[in-house]
Amino acid sequence: MKIWRYEKDNIDTDMLFPGKYIYTCSTAEEIRPHLLEDLDSSFANNVKKGDIIFAGKNFGCGSSREQPVVGLKAVGVAAVVAESFARIFYRASINQGLLLIECPDAVKSYSVGDEVSVDIENGKITVGQKSFSFPKLPKEILAICDAGGLLPYTRKKLEKR
Amino acid sequence: MGMTFVEKIFAKYSSVEKVVTGQIVTVKPDHLLTHDNTAAIIQKIQPELKKYGVYDPLLSVIVLDHVIPAASEKTATNHKLIREFVKKHKIKHFFDVGCGVCHQIVVEKGLALPGKLLLGSDSHTCSYGAIGAFSSGIDRTEAASLMLTGETWLKVPNSIKMILRGKLQPGVSAKDVVLHIIDDISASGANYCSVEFHGDLDQFSVEERFTIANMGVEMGAKNAFFPADNVTTKFLKSIGIPASQYTAINPDNDASYSQELTYNLLEITPVVACPHSVDNVKKVTELEGLKIQQCLIGTCTNGRLSDFQIAARILKGKKVHSDVRLLILPSSRQVYMDALNEGVIDIFVEAGGVVLPPGCGPCLGAHQGALAPGERCLSTANRNFKGRMGCKEAEIYLASPATVAVSAVLGKISDPRKVMK
């Protein structure tokens, strides 16, 4: 498992997935080669299932495009840990079932080489020797995550009608 | 204790008397906006659409604006899919290529009204706060779910009260105000919050309020709201909507805010947001003389008639600098026609400007007016992210229509106050 550390704040949706591709790439296969293209050109070819991203404040700000979230989920990123997230990105991640952890202390504590593990059940992230807790999602939102994302959740809702 | 705007409208739309910050409510929005991304949205839910149909053909507002006219077989096919969907499901509010940018259309056609709640799969959906509505951006998947069910959840946010006091100086505009605020609170300063504007708002037309609300998302806000007042009523009357057709929701005087910020408008000067973040704001005087290769006047932020009139006053009888390309991007067909009738387009074309079809054009870098490595663009749009206009080695600077017009003539970033006394 690799940690991808991006120190700067305000990593925006154009860095995560350039606007020039948004009307030609929608599926995970189309998205993958351009994932994080303008932020880190080595990411798309080297990211592996279970990797974790560490970032600063306001990660995912900007556009409502969901390709960054769909792409990160598809390549198997286990979690994005940031000091804070932009709201549409946060919402999109709930809808795709991508785990976001808002925990400034964990981000600040991380240094290269630290082992990182996440305990979703108990809302705990361990970085090196230190553990930090992060707030659990409200039950209404957890129901969407438990269903495997918003579309499966919606399908169930429609079937019950 | 009184209630903020967002508390009042969330309580109304979830049919409860009171809501508290952090509470999750379920709402049925009045409209759901989608654009070229409708193609990707409906492809996610083909079997469900076949089985259940859309929740309500009146819910969706679909505007083709992002890549128009189609730039490739792929984008043309997307547009075709959308047109077929619209016909099949009898979607009433459909606006094809050439009508304008979705946000301008929603306001111009009276689809956003005071006290209404709208969601849209575009981050600048927050624009309709200009008219006293609640509106906020969502992703494609959520738009797909809304098409099927007509409802979603919202979390009651904290509210920030921004009080605008005093009067703007000549040469300073609504764009300078909003960039000044983003500079002050940062690109994440209003994250997850509802932003309410208060104070001396009479001086701001609906068009100017639109510019400010449009950039609410650039400070992280969930929505950005101007109370409905006489200016709002007059505007709506001018587009044929009498006050009897809506019920405004305005905050109580004793509402409680997480933050109150007061801005003295007299102190605001023309500013420019520098690469690659909207909160990297500098006074125009600090950047004077910086050479530019492209200028863009228009977009959903500053592509309305009043913006064009300001730019035309500066460009009349002048030529765009020989090292600069000037692009003009009307936010709608209506704006385009009004600008034609006023002779404003003549001025732009005679000055050497290139008029683009009403849509999103170069703003998102998908086509039209992309930049080359090393080039600098001064634009009236809302974002200057790295790579936003198609090239990560190019630079985008954001400013008001006046600043961009003056700079287009001089070939370098220039202070509009020199010509606007």
Image (tube, coloured by chain):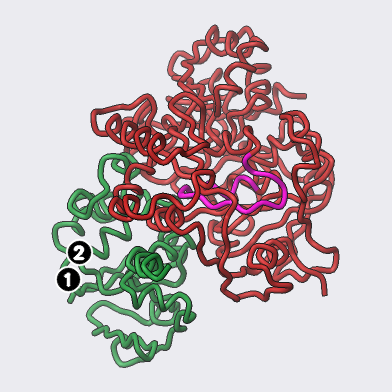
Left or right of B237 in this view: B302? left
Is B192 placed above or below B215 here? below
Residue B116 falls within the magenta-colored stretch: yes
Is B90 placed above or below A74 here? above
Find numbered disc 1 in the image and state the secondary structure of the residue it sits on. Answer: loop
Q: Nearer the viewer, residue A2 or A147?
A: A147
Q: Residue at x 25, y 83 (%)?
A: A114
Q: Earlier in the sequence, mark 1 or mark 2?
A: 1
- Which circle marks residue A75 in the picture? 2
Q: Nearer the viewer, residue B29 or B339?
A: B29
Q: Amino acid at mark 2?
A: Val
Q: Nearer the viewer, residue B186 or B156?
A: B156
Q: Position of residue B144 (x, y in %)?
A: 39, 54
Q: Residue at x 65, y 62 (%)?
A: B13
Q: Which residues are magenta?
A: B111-128
State yes or no: discs 1 and 2 in contact (Cβ < 8 Å).
yes
- Which circle marks residue B375 in the picture? none
Residue B240 falls within the magenta-colored stretch: no
Left or right of B115 in this view: A149? left
Q: Position of residue A63 (x, y in %)?
A: 44, 50
**In which quadrant of the rendered image does the N terminus of chain B lie?**
bottom right
Tell me the quarter of the picture where residue B8 sits: bottom right
User: Chain B rendered in what hue?
Assistant: red
Left or right of B10 in this view: B26? left
* Inter-mark Cα distance, 1 to 2: 6 Å
The residue under label 1 is A49
Find numbered disc 2 in the image and state the secondary structure of the residue it sits on. Answer: loop
Q: Residue at x 39, y 81 (%)?
A: A106
**In which quadrant of the rendered image does the C terminus of chain B lie?**
top right
Q: Residues within 10 Å of mark 1 (few under 14, many from 20)?
A: some
Residue B145 visible from this viewpoint? yes
Chain shown green: that is A
